[in-house]
Image: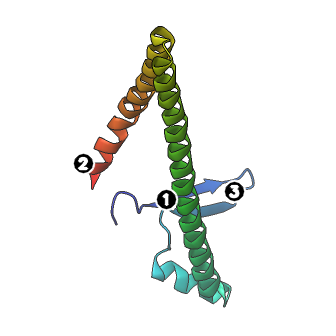
Amino acid sequence: MSDKNKMLIEATQDSDGNQSVTIGITDNLPNPILVEHWNQLVPTAAREILTMARDEQKNRHANDRSERWSKLIGQLTSFVIILVGLIGAIVLIREGRPIEGLTMFFGPLATLAGVVWMFRKPIESQIIKK
């Protein structure tokens, strides 16, 4: 098993002397040997486990798509807000109000630079991991 796929076994004993063993698996699907034993106890166990794994995968894919769309909408909205600020700055400068125009120009520009700098490191770490 790899580091992420580990089997956890815990043995306990209650005050009456009854012993129990709990087995946990940190993986999407359990070991086939365990599934075979579970099928002896509950005949539909294997089918139920595979159904749960399939449903979990569908849910995970839907969440990934939703997260990507949320990020894209957020980026587009930010871009539009910054673009409106820059256009407003140009209009103010052309109308003879350079101080207000430059202030309005450098505000969105500094915000854009800050956002790019803030999200730069996670992107670099993702590239290194792949």
Q: Is residue 14 left or right of residue 68?
A: right
Looking at the rendering, in which quadrant would you find the N terminus? bottom left
Q: CA distance from mark 1 to mark 2?
A: 31 Å
Q: Is residue 124 left or right of residue 15?
A: left
Q: Nearer the viewer, residue 65 or 75?
A: 75
| Residue occupying image coordinates x 57% and y 75% | 53
| Residue occupying image coordinates x 51% and y 78% | 34
| Residue topped by disc 1 | 8
Amino acid on which disc 1 is placed:
Leu
| Residue topped by disc 3 | 17
Q: Is residue 45 left or right of residue 2?
A: right
Q: Where in the figure is residue 2, as x and y percent of width and height?
A: 33, 62
Q: Nearer the viewer, residue 79 or 34?
A: 79
Provide the secondary structure element on which disc 3 rests: loop
Amino acid on which disc 2 is placed:
Ile
Quarter of the image where one finds residue 118: top left
**N-term mark: 3 or 2:** 3
| Residue occupying image coordinates x 61% and y 87% | 47
Quarter of the image where one finds residue 63: bottom right
Q: Where in the figure is residue 14, as x and y percent of width and height?
A: 70, 53
Q: Which dot, 3 or 1, sits closer to the camera?
A: 1
